[in-house]
Image (tube, rainbow, N blue to C red):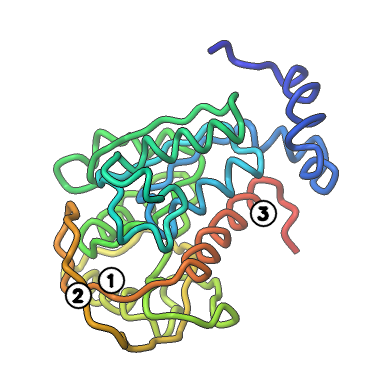
Amino acid sequence: MAEKTEGTFLMTELQGIFSRTALLLGDASMKQLVQKRVIVVGVGGVGSWCAEGLVRSGIRRLTIVDSDLVTLSNVNRQLMATTLSVGRPKVEVLKERLLSINPEAEIVTLQRVFCEETADSFHLEEYDYIIDAIDSLKDKALLILRATATSARFFSSMGAALKMDPTRIKVTEFWRVKGDPLARALRKRFKRDGCYPQRKFQCVFSDELLQNQGTPAQEEQTTFFKAQTNGTVAHITAIFGFMLTALVVQDATKLSP
């Protein structure tokens, strides 16, 4: 696909699918968005909504990472998961949806795990923004360390499970997150290993912590071990994802208050 010039971009996208966004942000900010390269690592309950929010906001160069297939238990909260997409790779289903929003988007899919063995292959240094939306504690810690060692802007999602109240979702710097077990476990791991993020970064989190009320169903297969499967709902995971989108858009356009 031939790369569009800025002039062509303004004549097409800004006068079409992004006209309302451009009306609010202005043409100069839209040009900034279209030039940014973003990678979302993990496109489950949080990352899938973040990816859609980014594309709907004007991000055109997006890499989505996830090794898993869609399962029936994903349907309650993951954007691309439907009864028709069960069994298909999450990244491929999501790519189809994102291209149906903006056919000119450059969507790269990586169907693999981000881990110690594969981390170098992701070339994180090539991105303007890195979004962490993965669940595995070990791999999440590694991504945080690797991402904060680059010049990219980095944003991370803490745990979105066991929550119902959207008004308790907040954004703060990682070391100031309170009431989130995942953040606590990450900090403990960094202290144990004596290896810390090289710079501060913003996180989306909630200090709400409910308890499972139902009986766990048979576990679906994933590419990493889960110590426990917790209940999640769409309105919380979607808000987490959209708040990550907002962090990127506000930073790229410099229009945040």
**Residue 65 place in picture, x, y as percent:** 34, 42
The residue that label 1 is drawn on is 186
Left or right of 101? Residue 236 is left
- Name the N-terminal-most of marks 1 and 3: 1
The answer to which of 28 and 109 lies nearer the viewer is: 109
Left or right of 254? Residue 97 is left
Q: Is residue 213 above or below residue 38?
A: below
**What separation in Å lies between label 1 and label 3 (alpha carbons)?**
26 Å
Determine which of the numbered discs, if any, sits on residue 47 in the image.
none
**What separation in Å lies between label 1 and label 2 (alpha carbons)?**
17 Å
The residue that label 3 is drawn on is 250
Label 1, secondary structure: give it.
Answer: helix
The image quadrant of residue 230 is bottom left
Q: Residue furthest front?
A: 83
- Name the N-terminal-most of marks 3 and 2: 2
The answer to which of 83 and 37 lies nearer the viewer is: 83
The residue that label 2 is drawn on is 228
Left or right of 70? Residue 163 is right
- The mark lying in front, picked from 3 and 2, is 2
Q: Is residue 222 above or below residue 167?
A: above
